[in-house]
Amino acid sequence: AAEPKLIVVADAEALAQAAAERVMARIAANPGRIAICLTGGSSPKKLYQLLGSDGYRSRIPWDRVHWFVGDERFVPESDPLNNMAVARAIFLDRDAPSGHIHPIPTLVENPNESAAAYAHELQAFYGSERLDPARPLFDLVLMGAGPDGHTASLFPGYPEIEETARWVVGVPKANVAPFVPRVSLTLPALASCREMLFEIAGHDKQPILTRLLNGENLPALRARSHGETVWMVDRAALPEGIRGPR
Ligand code: 6PG
């Protein structure tokens, strides 16, 4: 997979704007059914707010877009930690047809059962149990990078990061807060996209971005699209000594 392309923007506000424009460009590039894989954590919230604002929501062909999520905290949708619930509350519930919102089910026995159910849902949507490199599962996959270098809920040193067959896995114990079990798409499932877009903003991200730019073999570096991989970062997250545009 191609090296990530680094795009530097001024701040978190500019990052959300630029990310929203990439979302719109991916939507515009596909005249048919569109699949977007969302993410959790704090990073995408500004982007979700923008997509729900008047300027953007009127430009989204809601009847053609399906919304998935790359990882989930194994808590009910009523829990504020639930990633898809956050996206729904900020923008999806207002405009997306409910059949086009595809949450990871958490009202099941355990994360493994949830993972199996979501894999089935993805495979039914895709129309195959085998990923064809010529036909990506997602148009766009949104990602973030955690302080330990995790992405989605694929944590460094955990066995799930090595998964090559399954599309979705249960992760019994998280490596960082919140310490709830997780359900995560795997590297091969996440890679099946036209574009993987990382949003990395703020001074708190400087240590991990420095490590990633130094080439440490962490999950956030190993996650690559078969198409285009973009790291969108703001100046505050950049390592000392690297200068972005003024
Ligand atoms: C999650 C996310 C996770 C996130 C990173 C960055 O469920 O926590 O999907 O992979 O993207 O942890 O999180 P922040 O945006 O909060 O820094």
Image (tube, helix red, strand yellow):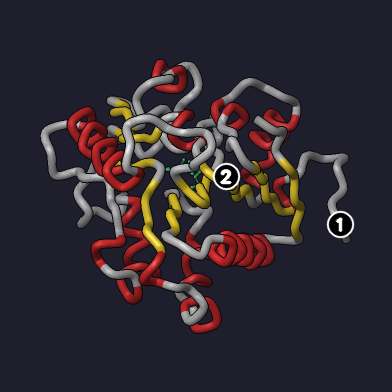
Q: Position of residue 212 (x, y in %)?
A: 68, 30
**In the drawing, what numbered circle is on residue 214?**
none
The residue singled out by tag 1 in the image is: 245
Furthest-left residue in this view: 109
Q: Measuring 48% from the left and 16% from the top, which residue is drawn there?
A: 157
Q: Is residue 46 above or below residue 212?
A: below
Where the C terminus falls, by quadrant?
bottom right
The residue singled out by tag 2 in the image is: 196
Q: Is residue 95 left or right of residue 140?
A: left
Q: Earlier in the sequence, mark 1 or mark 2?
A: 2
Of residues 27 and 73, which is closer to you in this image?
27
Residue 16 visible at all: no
User: Element type at marker 2?
Assistant: strand
Q: Is residue 100 above or below residue 82?
A: below
- Tell me the amino acid under the disc marked 1: Pro
Of residues 60 and 132, which is closer to you in this image?
132
Residue 88 visible at all: yes
Where the N terminus falls, by quadrant?
top right
Q: Position of residue 90 (x, y in %)?
A: 39, 68
